[in-house]
Amino acid sequence: MLTERTVSQFLDELASNSPAPGGGSVAALAGAVGSALTSMVCNLTIGKKKYADVQEEISALLDQSERLRREMTELIDKDTEAFNMVMAAFGLPKSNEEEQAARTAAIQEATKQATLVPLSVMALCERSLHLARTVAEKGNKNSASDAGVAALMLQASCAGAALNVRINLGGITDTGFVQQTAAKYKEISRQAELLTREVLMEVEKTIGN
């Protein structure tokens, strides 16, 4: 599993001529990093007398952030697995009409699954950005820049995952699936951009300059 490798090992494989892991796994990783940073700000807020009035809220937020981090971490491997399923479908025999039909159906199904993984990453990023906005507003002000970086990582994750959704949609013939998925990724993208701006506005209030 990719998540069990060292950072150097992961980067070496990423830089190799293998098409997977690729941008999809990196997008999921960026989301996990953003969630981890959000958790860090929570941990640096909990137990501080200055923030006694938000302890309960931040503690609950930490639980949510850690759950989202775990889910995004799982998607690092799931994205590569989905890509490998698409490649396996393309490798199916096609020597007669029956095999060709089965191969086409397998490619379509695998491509749909490969689209749903980055769409899940996007949805998790949107949820994580809501948390980042709260910690930027109510969390430890000494970690305001960390909250900002968390939001930027989540924004990059969401935007990167959107590219993977879009490129996969181009190969899907199910118009209903394409239209529904396109509507979802566009709305999530819009919300993610809005939330990121709101987080950065809170950060600017704190750090100025």
Image (cartoon, rainbow, N blue to C red):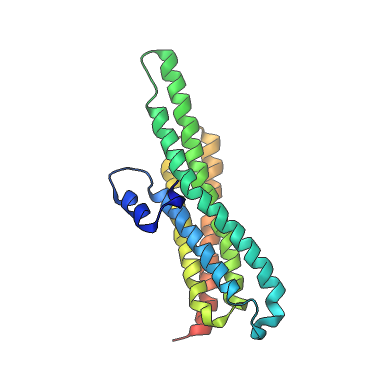
Residue with the most extreme left position: 17
Q: Position of residue 198 (x, y in %)?
A: 55, 71
Instruction: Please name whichever residue, 199 or 15, is drawn nearer the observer in this view of the structure.
Output: 15
Whether residue 203 is visible here, answered yes or no, is: yes
Q: Position of residue 20 (x, y in %)?
A: 37, 44
Whether residue 185 is visible here, answered yes or no, is: no
Residue 142 in the image: above or below residue 102: below
Residue 208 in the image: above or below residue 79: below
Q: Residue at x 50, y 36 (%)?
A: 112
Instruction: Please name whichever residue, 158 or 76, is drawn nearer the observer in this view of the structure.
Output: 76
Instruction: Please name whichever residue, 44 or 119, is drawn nearer the observer in this view of the structure.
Output: 44
**In the rendered image, which quarter is residue 156 located in?**
bottom left
Whether residue 208 sits left or right of residue 49 in the image: it is left
Q: Position of residue 27 (x, y in %)?
A: 44, 54
Q: Quadrant of the C terminus?
A: bottom left
Q: Residue at x 38, y 58 (%)?
A: 7
Whether residue 187 sits left or right of residue 54 in the image: it is left
Q: Residue at x 51, y 53 (%)?
A: 73
Instruction: Please name whichever residue, 163 or 183, is drawn nearer the observer in this view of the structure.
Output: 163
Q: Position of residue 182 (x, y in %)?
A: 51, 45
Q: Residue at x 55, y 58 (%)?
A: 69
Residue 104 in the image: above or below residue 54: above
* Total labels drawn: 0
